[in-house]
Image: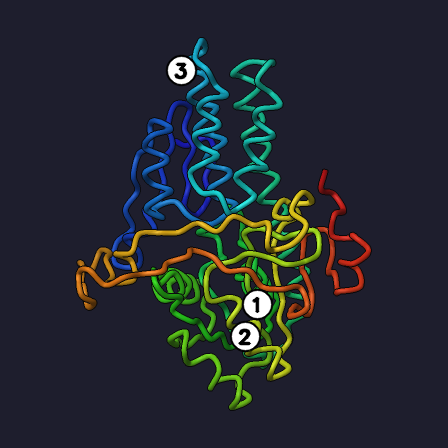
Amino acid sequence: MPHLQSRSLRVYADHLEYLDQTQLPQAEQWVRCDSPEEWQVAVKSLAIRGAPLIGLSAAFVLAQYAALHPQSDWQLVSDRLRATRPTAVNLMYCLDAMEACFEQGASALAERAAELFAEDRALCQRMAERGADLLKTSDRVLTHCNTGALATAGVGTAIGALAVAKQRGVELHVFVDETRPLLQGGRLTAWEMADLGIPYQLITDSMAASLMAAGKVDKVMVGADRICANGDFANKVGTYMLAVIAHYHQVPFYVVAPYTTVDPACATGADIPIEQRDPAEIRGVAGAFGEVTWAPDNAPVWNPAFDVTPAKLVTAWVLDTGVFDAAAIERGEHFLGRS
């Protein structure tokens, strides 16, 4: 039996198992991970994904490596893990916490990883409850990418708010945009909505503007991979587009994330490193359903994994520590709880 378990991660004494999110929704396939190298492959392929889950799984991988290799250079391994996905700050937060325990030995690392797991579960619940407070029966909510239990140790971030609202008896309708190029919305969020019993409709990303113009969206709720000191934030590419459209149509736009996503060292969105991904992701699509290529094999591609949304387009930042409007962000109140 695993020592700890979430919707997409199982932690054993000497290894991890992860739910391969590239295979959903066609197949629920659990894969064993025995080494930092295997973890890097899983994260780069998005078999392990979601900013909180990436950080937590890295912490356990590092702790297990330290237990098996007590004389090795743990810092070198941590540095390699850190470089795997540069945009999401949760990875940096978790590895910083682990590195602070190096002098205490491998057992301390295992304990710290478990603490981070428990912390994330609690943070998810608190931010989800705050987000649910903003929702009322008959609300039609538009989401982007996947921000549910698949991406965290707990109930999720933005989707967590929808889940808690559902538990409270709030009747919602969710518009799930497919989230090109890797379809995390169509594959993962639609799957989670069905699992939660929340009515939803799947749309292509390019339909969002028409949907808002028709007055069919009451709120937009998204997650974040990094929130800057000024409130700018990075999230899955396509988020900025939604924020611009929501601002034009005066639809409230909420960011739901744990305080661990706030990066005080990052002044503005211009300071966020944006990961560039494989051009093949744009030329076609692959998954448990097979592989299809629709563009010429040599078609030039620009494929950033994330984009940056300016703070001025955000209605409020929903963190576990509170709900912050633009004035609160200017006062730095979103740093509460963040060292």
Sequence order check: which comes first, mark 1 or mark 3?
3
Location of residue 188 with respect to 105 vertically, above or below: below
Closest to the observer, 109 or 199: 109
Q: CA distance from mark 1 to mark 3?
A: 42 Å
Residue ID at (41%, 37%): 10
Colour scheme shown: rainbow
Task: Determine whether label 2 and label 1 are within 8 Å by CB.
Answer: yes
Which residue is tagged 2?
141
Closest to the observer, 15 or 292: 292
Residue ID at (60%, 73%): 170
Closest to the observer, 21 or 238: 238
Q: CA distance from mark 3 to mark 2?
A: 47 Å
* Helix, strand or loop for disc 2: strand
Task: Determine whether label 3 and label 2 are within 8 Å by CB.
Answer: no
Apparent side of residue 227 relative to residue 191 in the rendered image (left or right): right
Q: Residues within 10 Å of mark 3 (few under 14, many from 20)?
A: few
Which residue is tagged 3?
68
Q: Amino acid at mark 1?
A: Met
Which residue is tagged 1?
221
Q: Residue 1: x percent and y percent?
A: 39, 31
Location of residue 121 with respect to 316 vertically, above or below: above
* Helix, strand or loop for disc 1: strand
